[in-house]
Image (spheres, grey):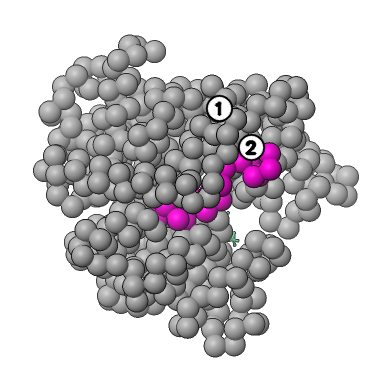
Amino acid sequence: MNRVSESLQPILEEVIRRNPAEAEFHQAVQEVLESLGPVVTRHPEYTDGEVIRRLCEPERQIIFRVPWTDDAGRVQLNRGFRVQFSSALGPFKGGLRFHPSVYLGIVKFLGFEQIFKNALTGLPIGGAKGGSDFDPKGRSDAEVMRFCQSFMTEMYRHIGEHTDVPAGDAGVGRREIGYLFGQYKRITDRYESGVLTGKGLTWGGSQVRTEATGYGTVFFVDEMLRHSGDSFEGKRVLVSGSGNVAIYAIEKVQELGGRVIACSDSDGFIVDEAGIDLDLIKEIKQERRGRISEYTDQRPGARFVAGEGIWDIPCDIALPCATQNELRGADATALLRGGCRIVAEGANMPTTPDAIRLLVDGGVRFAPGKAVNAGGVATSALEMQQNASRDSWAFDYTEERLAEIMRTLHDRCLETADEYGAPGDYVAGANIAGFTRVADAMLALGLV
Ligand code: NDP
């Protein structure tokens, strides 16, 4: 069902017509437009200046060939993308995703979301996203390095500390950022730390960047709980995925007294009623790059279930932290049946629109990824600050900055939702607060 107001409907139709077969991008645009009806009624200047139409068109899209050789000496070929969506608030900023599902529609949905997410942080960063259909899974370090070097050999001419600052996303962690940074440095002959974030601590990285998206997600939910006089203490929590976001979300939930009883990868999920053993997950997924099913080898009390179904487990809080559209209508019904009260998106757009409606109608408090998972990019902006001043901050100080950003961001969503007549609606609050900040900057900068 489409809840876009009549005045904005032509914009959605134009986006669909001009970007055919990009379903995820259409979905992301629709979700934002559904919130903006009351905004354009109150602010005709946004319509007069065609701000929304302009925002739906990326400033620049780069698609390039990435040839490389595998360990057997065979030539391999992938496609690289960088979509520079909006630089109204600062240099383009957003991660790179390496996954076989990557195509232009995924990169555009992620880049579009990134504009509002970055605006919401209150920091001076524009929105972008990039990546490749390269699959790092099962590849040797040497293969990953050759791929990254080839990728950067094209991308270096489009980025820079004042132009566009990529970071990691799914499939791109510190190893990949290292190879990308090394090649950038070699080609440009510049030690330009601010060109990439997510770097290693000994070569320009920031404390807490690795943990930031997962920790930030939990700080956001902690704030939701506090607003209703509650806390994580004793809560049953489901976390999908077992990658960067999921692992550090689990860590922080456990620190705050919650019990994470299940997590997953693309093969299936594990259930451990005693609480997930996070050290074991880290060993399997980070050190060995193994599969989640291996968990039960060392935890006989736990069980592995192949395929989907993690949301069928009764819980108080669900944190989808794996991938887009992983939580669908039937999953929402299962969560309601299991007593879930809060769903907060650690991943980008993991909940389908029909699932969101079911959850909200069923009384669940729902918070969208562009607010909940903004702690990753916010800490990337803190990394840029440290790089610019050639400084490096302590872990505790950086974590407190992140926590403060998430508290402010949470309140900004609620205050904006109130202001526009949708009290308690985190989706409306996040979309409107992100949009108005970037829209005002666009009007101030003229038609560029
Ligand atoms: P990773 O690549 O580190 O981890 C992704 C995890 O999700 C892996 O465990 C993967 O399993 C699992 N997964 C993928 N598809 C499915 C599926 N269909 N069902 C169950 N599990 C699945 O990625 P990140 O943790 O970095 O990113 C996860 C999400 O968070 C993405 O949406 C990303 O855009 C978003 N995000 C990430 C940020 C960051 O800082 N990293 C910042 C903001 C958002 P497998 O090992 O089998 O592939």
Q: Position of residue 271 (x, y in %)?
A: 49, 79
Closest to the observer, 26 or 125: 125
Number of the label disc, if any, that sits on residue 388: 1
Counting residues from the start of the chain, the first of labels 1 and 2 encountered is 2
Give the secondary structure at mark 1: helix
Q: Quadrant of residue 205?
A: top right
Residue at the spot 66% in from the left edge and 44% down from the top edge: 200
Q: Is residue 371 above or below residue 446?
A: below
Q: Residues within 10 Å of mark 2 (few under 14, many from 20)?
A: many
Asked if the residue under mark 2 is in contact with the one under mark 1, i.e. CB atoms within 8 Å, the reply is no
**Coordinates of residue 335 in the picture (x, y in percent):** 32, 71
Check the image and report above or below for 240 versus 192.
below
Residue at the spot of label 2:
204
State which region is magenta.
199-217
Assess whether residue 166 is covered by the magenta stretch.
no
Distance from Cα at disc 1 to Cα at disc 2: 10 Å
Q: Is there any visible trace of residue 135 in the rendered image?
A: yes
How many residues crowd mark 1 within 10 Å: few (<14), some (14–19), many (20+)? few
Could you say which quadrant of the image residue 161 lies in?
Answer: top right
Question: What kind of residue is marked 1?
Answer: Ala
Task: Locate residue 159 relative to residue 94 in the image: left or right.
Answer: right
Q: Position of residue 272 (x, y in %)?
A: 49, 80
Residue drawn at (44%, 24%) of the image: 90
Residue located 37% across and 56% down the image: 219
Q: Main secondary structure of the magenta part?
A: helix
Q: Nearer the viewer, residue 397 or 148?
A: 397
Name of the residue lying farthest toward the bottom:
301
Residue sitting at x 60%, y 70%: 279
For label 2, the SS is loop
